[in-house]
Amino acid sequence: MSSLVIQDLHVSIGEKPIVKGLTLTINSGEVHAIMGPNGTGKSTLSKAIAGHPDYTITSGDVLVDGGSILAQEADERARAGIFLAFQYPSEIPGVSIANFLRAAQQARMAEGEEIDASAYYKRLYSKMDLLKIDRKFTSRAVNDGFSGGEKKRCEILQMAMLEPKFALMDETDSGLDIDALRIVADGVNTMRGPNLGVLLITHYQRLLDYIVPDHVHVMYDGRIVKSGDKSLALELEAKGYDWIKKELAATTA
Amino acid sequence: MKPPTDTDTLTAPVDTAAVENPAVGIDQTAGNFSYKVDYAFDAGTGLSEDTVRYISSVKKEAPWILEFRLAALKKFFAMPMPTHWATKDLENIDFQKIRYYLSQGQKPKRTWDEVPDDIKKTFERLGIPEQERKFLAGVEAQFDSEAAYSNIKEIVAKQGVIFVNSTEGLREHPELFKKFFGKVIPTGDNKFSALNSAVFSGGSFIYVPKGVKVAQPLQAYFRINAENFGQFERTLIICDEGAEVTYMEGCTAPKFSTSTLHSAVVELVALKGAKIQYITVQNWANNVFNLVTKRGIAHEDAEIKWIDCNIGSRLTMKYPGVVLKGERARGEVISIALANDGQHQDTGAKMIHAANNTTSNIVAKSISVGQGRSTYRGVVHIPKHLKGCKNNTECDALLINTNSRTDTYPAITVRGDKNSTQHEASVSKVSEDMIFYMQQRGLTEGQAMSLAVNGFINDLARQFPMEYSVELKRLIDLEMEGSVG
């Protein structure tokens, strides 16, 4: 059992504070959804946890299994088991998916250990079949010329191959039609289990019909302002984010 | 036994920082090695008529060859350095301090202990076999692969292929080679082709008979040509009608050299319907001036393809060219250049269209790391009276650090209204977002950079024979590790 603890986190981009004191604990086996209006810091949160150099953590801490990761480089955090499914995945021209994932996997192995090629490909193909990604894609350059939906499916494929402890999924549903959404959700659900903690960042409730969360949190103005179970998402869908704003105004008044 | 002598030296003081390159080069200015010398045939340093006569007599050459050399020497002395367009660094070459001929088997050596650790590490990382390391590092004068070499020669000899060095070629088969020798690249083409024409030694002379398609690349199992110490190699490949051959030279491992000037000439002739593919991987140590003239003539329906990879040397100037002499001839240059600290890769291509319906294709990718400088120079010439000619040029530059440099000088002359040309150029750097994306998957910054750079040249690297492309990838990994941080 692992834990990802975010403690009163404050994140800025340059001088501008975006996340203003966020506290949340995600344990293995749990799926947490974070919803909120645009510009409220959802993506910033995930990128800051992943270690993106553009984001400055001005105070607070992030701990994996009790140890702070803030001093670690992005790649160290990744090897420690953090995976970020990007909202806008990068293209890597000339580097095939097969080679990229093999390099990523090799990076996690001990010095001198080599990947068993046939076992690797067997695994890769089975995950691709699951995610209905044509096997031909192994030789295509990562995300190069992919449609939005294909990029998102590629993120899930990477997640499936790298088997993280914690997956931060940044608006994974954006740009997906219903069929693609189903495939992505099925993929994530197959990975769901006692060894994986998921932070699902989403704008719309729709995704949560397919990936049913254990906890739902509403983020507003850089903080979590309300938490509940999956019914909170439905309430939010029905009443809109204005309802949250009004509630907040009422309590702070 | 004669006392040891110095290596070739340059007149202008060499910036130690520029010459030292932990990943690839050898710091020759430190003078931290000495070597025993035992010359049977030694022309001494300096260049004069006597030098040329000496070389010719040692080789027991026919009089016409000596005439050829002497005429070339005159031209060489008469021609100015091309510093009005090329880098002024050329002025650092002191022709009188260079040794122009050293007989094979008596090259200077050093002990393995004297080889810098960085070099040893590079060999390790590139997976260079033990035996080859000693040769490359200058510990052994000759790579003993005579067995492998003569094996290839036997196989192709059965097909009637002639595969010898320049001396033997001109002596034993003048009727074949004299026809084209010095005709693809005339002596006076440039100052350095004149120099080569005066003092050439070594290199390969190849003739492939009509219709013969040589199955395996020549030199495939003998990557390290025994003559590769040759500073002034002269190569001439003639493919008769319908014949095909692939020729490979060089290797990715850094090559130790006591000589600071290498000036080769390569002439290719593809007769009707013939195909020649010439692959070079160059990684001379960082003190070497590598000034090469390469050109091919493609006759009707023939194809000449140059695949050129330049990783080493202090300065490389090389513009493989094709003269498209016959209708429907095709010329291609694929070029990869990597310039690190203290290096200047000044490379490109020349496509001269001289018949209708000819096509040419140039794809050049360069990577500038640290203070390295890459320059692309491309000449495309299609005159007014021709029809149906096409050229496509793509040159892409990748700058790794903020002080890296790249320049592009395309010289395109296309006339007439029935021809077309296309030129695309790009300059980019590896984006931070891309690096972060890769780091997020567990790759270190250095590993991410390597992948990105390998991805940049992937299309081209794939056209190299496998053993080269594997080594090339490893070499880039090494260079990128040094560049990050």
Image (tube, helix red, strand yellow):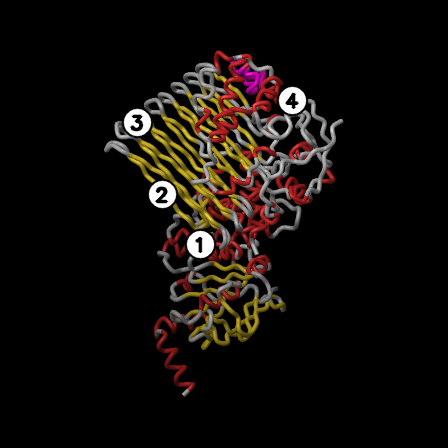
Badge nearest the viewer, 1 or 2:
2
Looking at the picture, do discs 3 and 1 lie on one chain?
no
x and y percentages locating residue B180 in the rendered image: 45, 18
Residue matched to label 3: B357
Please tell me whether mark 1 sits on a helix, a strand or a loop.
Answer: loop
Q: Residue furthest bottom?
A: A253
- Residue range highlighted in magenta: B153-170
x and y percentages locating residue A47 in the rendered image: 49, 64
Specify the subunit that label 4 lies on: B
Looking at the picture, do discs 2 and 4 lie on one chain?
yes
Badge nearest the viewer, 3 or 1:
3
Q: Is residue A81 visible?
A: yes
Res. B146 mark? 4
Residue type at mark 2 is: Glu
Res. A223 mark? none
Q: CA distance from mark 3 to mark 1?
A: 42 Å
| In contact (CB < 8 Å): disc 4 and disc 1 | no
Q: Is residue B445 above or below residue B458?
A: below
Res. A90 mark? 1
Residue matched to label 2: B424
Q: Is residue B393 magenta?
A: no
x and y percentages locating residue B273 in the rendered image: 39, 20
Q: Could you tell me how many numbered marks the image carries?
A: 4
Q: Is residue A99 above or below residue B307?
A: below
Specify the subunit that label 1 lies on: A
For the point 39% across and 47% down, which residue is it? B426
x and y percentages locating residue B247 in the rendered image: 51, 26
